[in-house]
Image (cartoon, coloured by chain):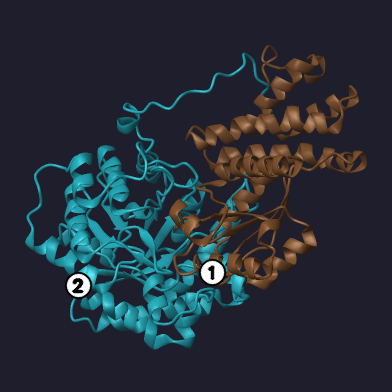
């Protein structure tokens, strides 16, 4: 069996650079908030080509397609749930077009974001329902020529597994990252240690796993250290935001400079990440600085300490991230239960 | 299968034991047990409002506190809120009959331009779990829709959510419009969403920024109590 393009590239190189922001970049091109970015695949294809080209020109080895909200559940909010096949396929086709004339290998990663629905038993979405929606999207991204599926910003373990199952049904390799935005955990309480263990239990495991978005560059690297501490052999992905959004004179700005993101990229590699990119607020200018840092600065022999991360990138948003090594310093108090309890069954 | 020795027969517990057991069952998200316990207390002659406050709301407070302190996470909280709602469904018609006071009425929605709703859905579930009446008006709301819903629902609170840095400034548009129309003081305005912070909440003139759903519930309780005290004074 021929190996997929991402596996080949990972075998050849020590590290790869992914892309930056999709949403914030499109807003800068005039996307109105409230509009579905995916509709631009059809309505403004030149802007989508420019988005992809920006990442390629800045030196990205991998870029994500404009299909993050491309599941039926998300498109339904724009009454476009019947266009899942079309919008995702074109997202990938435009990507293929840009990648194939790059003059070097560039991976087209078919972005798949969360459904936005809460899964059973807490919410209404069944596991099979989630698989079905992801599968529909996955087939379309595959048809459009994506090299790999790229599942991101997930917060629930079951939703991550459902996306993996969908990739299996579509016969596609996949990468999956979660967003650790709640005191170092995902919204649904998953820690970096939990995710590292979870990926090894999946029948069709991802080629790489990791963290994207979340709070700031510092928090994201603490999460990467957590993955690395699990002893995983699987490539780790770091896609952090360009700092933290600040409200300045009625406008929102991300406070991360290209210089800060260059330090972030270097530290991400030192922490153990092999695929390094940005997320919200990360422009081609940031990406160029990151690429330069990764190419020109040597890789450290040892992983940075939490203190070194704080010194270079700023403070963490929370004292602990819920993993064993940080919990030793801040043990959570246990609730005292009354003696007996009823069983649910 | 239930272990005989572990099994507790709710109807055999005295009132005090039963209420404590219901707090545990809420914590564990056991919906059937909460429904049963609610019926038992009503059967023993408890006023619906007393069941609500002593068995359900105070049980949810423990859940909310542990969520705030990072001991529980969203999945457990949602299960608890579902169990609470099952009890509420029994109490609601009875509360209406007896004219018991509601804790507060809330209109919540994501601002114009923003299509994210998971956060406000969590807040809705937790607020309902704490006994508030909530009207969730969904995503992408222009200021007119907020104001129409506030008036129609006779709300005490306006909750606004934004998950995008590009849409959060719209919260100020809504608040400014309320001020212009002389309606700002009628409502307690709470704002939340991943990119927000306290400084932003203050800058736009909200009453409070709420970091998460548990904080939203606590803040709402504290602010409505203060408002009632002011009216009483």
Question: Which quadrant is home to the N terminus of chain A?
Answer: bottom left
Task: Report if residue A144 is visible in the image.
Answer: no
Closer-to-camera residue (A64/A197): A64
Q: Residue furthest front?
A: B233
Q: Chain of mark 1?
A: B
User: In the drawing, what numbered circle is on residue A201?
Assistant: none
Q: Chain of mark 2?
A: A
Query: Residue B211: where, in percent of width, then height?
Result: 50, 47
Binning the other alpha carbons within 10 Å of mark 2 as few (below 14), some (14 to 19) or many (20 upward) gives many
Secondary-structure class at tag 2: loop
Q: Is residue B109 left or right of residue A222?
A: right
Closer-to-camera residue (B176/A279): B176
Question: Which quadrant is home to the C terminus of chain A?
Answer: top right
Query: Residue A85: where, in percent of width, then height?
Result: 52, 76
Q: Is residue B119 left or right of residue B185?
A: left
Indicate the quadrant where residue A110 lies: bottom left
Binning the other alpha carbons within 10 Å of mark 1 as few (below 14), some (14 to 19) or many (20 upward) gives many
């Amino acid at each position: 069996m021929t190996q997929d393009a991402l596996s080949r590239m990972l075998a050849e190189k020590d590290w790869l650079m992914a892309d930056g922001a999709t949403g914030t970049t499109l807003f800068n091109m005039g996307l109105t908030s409230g509009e579905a970015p995916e509709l631009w695949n059809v309505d403004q294809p030149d802007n989508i080509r420019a988005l992809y080209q920006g990442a390629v020109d800045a030196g990205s080895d991998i870029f994500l397609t404009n299909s993050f909200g491309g599941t039926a559940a998300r498109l339904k909010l724009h009454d476009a749930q019947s266009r899942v096949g079309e919008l995702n396929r074109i997202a990938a086709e435009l990507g293929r077009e840009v990648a194939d004339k790059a003059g070097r290998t560039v991976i087209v990663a078919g972005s798949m974001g969360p459904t936005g629905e809460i899964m059973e038993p807490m919410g209404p979405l069944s596991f099979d329902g989630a698989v079905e929606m992801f599968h529909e999207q996955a087939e379309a991204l595959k048809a459009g020529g994506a090299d790999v599926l790229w599942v991101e910003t997930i917060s629930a373990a079951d939703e991550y597994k459902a996306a993996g199952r969908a990739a299996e049904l579509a016969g596609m390799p996949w990468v999956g990252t979660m967003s650790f935005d709640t005191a170092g955990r995902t919204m649904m309480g998953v820690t970096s240690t939990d995710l590292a263990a979870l990926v090894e239990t999946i029948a069709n495991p991802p080629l790489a796993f990791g963290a994207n978005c979340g709070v700031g560059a510092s928090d994201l690297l603490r999460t990467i250290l957590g993955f690395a501490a699990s002893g995983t052999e699987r490539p780790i992905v770091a896609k952090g935001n360009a700092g933290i959004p600040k409200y300045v004179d009625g406008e929102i700005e991300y406070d991360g400079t290209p210089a800060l993101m260059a330090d972030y990229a270097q530290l991400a590699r030192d922490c153990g990440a092999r695929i390094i990119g940005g997320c919200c607020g990360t422009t081609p200018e940031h990406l160029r600085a990151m690429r330069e840092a990764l190419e020109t600065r040597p890789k450290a022999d040892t992983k940075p300490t939490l203190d070194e991360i704080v010194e270079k990138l700023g403070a963490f948003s929370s004292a602990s991230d819920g993993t064993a090594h940080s919990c030793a310093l801040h043990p959570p108090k246990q609730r005292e239960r009354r003696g007996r309890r009823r069983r649910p069954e | 299968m239930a272990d005989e020795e572990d099994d507790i027969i709710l109807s055999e517990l005295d009132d005090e034991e039963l209420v404590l057991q219901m707090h545990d069952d809420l914590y564990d998200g056991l919906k059937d047990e909460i429904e049963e316990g609610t019926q038992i207390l009503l059967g023993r002659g408890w006023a619906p409002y007393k069941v609500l406050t002593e068995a359900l709301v105070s049980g949810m407070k423990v859940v909310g506190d542990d969520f705030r302190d990072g001991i529980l996470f969203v999945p457990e909280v949602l299960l608890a809120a579902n169990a609470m709602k099952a009890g509420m469904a029994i109490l609601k018609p009875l509360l209406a009959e007896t004219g018991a006071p509601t804790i507060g009425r809330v209109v919540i929605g994501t601002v114009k331009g923003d299509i994210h709703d998971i956060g406000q859905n969590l807040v809705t579930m937790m607020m309902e779990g704490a006994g508030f009446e909530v009207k969730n008006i969904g995503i992408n709301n222009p200021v007119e829709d907020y104001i129409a819903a506030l008036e129609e629902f006779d709300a005490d609170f306006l909750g606004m959510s934004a998950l995008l840095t590009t849409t959060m400034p719209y919260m100020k548009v809504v608040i400014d419009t309320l001020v212009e129309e002389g309606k700002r003081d009628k409502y307690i305005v709470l704002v939340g969403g991943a990119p927000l912070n306290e400084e932003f909440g203050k800058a736009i003139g909200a009453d409070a920024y709420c970091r998460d759903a548990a904080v939203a519930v606590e803040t709402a309780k504290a602010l409505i109590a203060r408002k009632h005290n002011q009216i009483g004074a």
